[in-house]
Image (cartoon, helix red, strand yellow):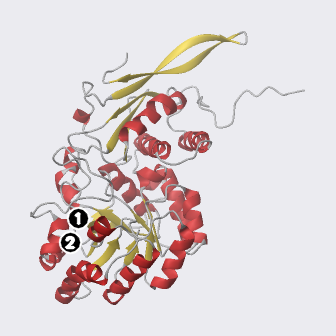
Amino acid sequence: MLTEIRKPYLPATPIDEDALRITKMETVIPEDVFPGLLLLRVHTTEGIVGHGETYYCPHAVAAMVHDWMARRLLGADALAIESHWRFLYERAANFGARGAELRAISAIDLALWDILGQVCNQPIYRLLGGPVRDRIPVYNSCGNPTYGIKANGDQGWPGYGSLGEPGPLSDSFNFFHDPAALAQDLLESGYSAMKVWPFDAAAHQHGGMRISREDVERAITPLRKIREAFGTRMEFMIDGHAFFLLPAALRIADGLRDLNPLWLEDILKMDNLETLADFRRQSRLPISASEMLLARPDFAELLQKHAADYVMIDPTWVGGISETARIAHLAQAHNIPVTMHDCTGPLTLYAGLHVNAAVATCCYQETVRAHIHTVYPRLIDKQIEVRDGFVDIPRGAGLGVTLNPDLFDTRSTTYRSSEWEVRSRDDAGTDEKRQYGRSGRGRVTR
């Protein structure tokens, strides 16, 4: 005789009748500010609003949020973070848990942690176990104010950012044209580490199958000038944007070895971790991998294959704060330090700061000062300050930062909302309340 199951596994229905419920989910794409970014607000019955974001293919992510995930979340317990995460992940995994699905889960997870922090009146890092440090070491990724952002009507392609134009924050341009002055400026601004991608031009011209010694020498000349001027005062990391195959990657490593970079990142694609492990052994340089891995099983395999010396995580790509913390602890079990990625949005940066604050083996937070000083102030209500190579841990409840409400303009063609309705329906002879989501594009649904 079958026993009636009254509560399903990972229930969406709140356990407590007076639970804080999700009433509305809003998304918008700030096309005139950061067109690859999706911004999210999650509203609750008590008026508490959680904020989230993710980067890349924002229209696809918005469709996942409203057309699929809102069915689970509207009317559900806003504080059942793990239940929602696991349910959405398991359902997405049936079709391959990558891409837009995981990015949508990431944005939602940030917003739910933000709500929990506000309910508890505590920063998120306290809910993760409390702070292990009072400030976070950061480095500067040498982009420019238009890096990853639409310029002259062209959004460009990932990994194909332009050098930009001359200017005080055009670090990608200045790295090639006056590297010593750039390093001096960064040191005076409090940075003691910088990340650059000097080999992109060769890859754009020839592909990643090969690279000439002349191209290698041309790319590392700015790094030599920085070493000559400042010795080891400035650490540097090398990002290859995953352009190169193994022989070219080994030639690049050979050219860099005497310059002692802190790590090599994404010189190879992350689609074959056996080859990455081989590259690590042959290169004899520290390897960072990488925000291009988008799920915990990927990072588990990376660690099992001894393919990296640093694990880098993007909180709004891997599944939010929940999954970022789990991956960080997984790396800790392998005695591998963790760094947080951000070239993708201000809430990504804040999420990374919270995990950095709570996990002892986190060692760096990526920043892009060109974004911090130009783009991020248009998106959030706080200014991020770097002092002596560090950022203070966030203060305030939840994320400790709020998205600019003016961005959620209901007249925008990229604005969408889904809202909670309660209807009565006769189901197997009983009259129950069920939750339905309504979704609108470019308007508010009532």
The residue where tag 1 is placed is 386
Q: Which quadrant of the rendered structure holds the C terminus?
A: top left
**Residue 333 image offset from top left, x and y in percent:** 58, 70
Which residue is at the front of the view, 288 or 161?
Answer: 161
**Residue 219 image offset from top left, x and y in percent:** 25, 77
Residue at 28% from the left image edge and 67% from the top image edge: 205
Residue at 41% from the left image edge and 63% from the top image edge: 356
Query: Is 303 left or right of 391, judged from the image as shown?
Result: right
**What is the quadrant of residue 440 in the picture?**
top left
Residue at 48% from the left image edge and 76% from the top image edge: 309
Question: Label 1 is placed on what type of residue?
Answer: Val
**Residue 173 image offset from top left, x and y in percent:** 16, 67
Circle number at residue 422: none
Label 2 – label 1 distance at C-alpha: 6 Å
The answer to whether mark 2 and mark 1 are in CB contact below 8 A is: yes
Question: Label 2 is placed on what type of residue?
Answer: Gly
Which residue is at the front of the view, 273 or 180?
Answer: 273
Tally of numbered discs = 2
The residue where tag 2 is placed is 190
Q: Is residue 354 above or below residue 24?
A: below
**What is the quadrant of residue 261 in the picture?**
bottom left
For mark 1, give the secondary structure: loop
Which residue is at the front of the view, 162 or 180?
Answer: 162
Does residue 134 appear in the picture of this structure?
A: no
**Residue 3 image offset from top left, x and y in percent:** 83, 28
Q: Is residue 184 above or below residue 232?
A: above
Which residue is at the front of the view, 280 or 234?
Answer: 280
Q: Which quadrant of the rendered structure holds the N terminus?
A: top right
Q: Earlier in the sequence, mark 2 or mark 1?
A: 2
Query: Is 95 left or right of 113, judged from the image as shown?
Result: right
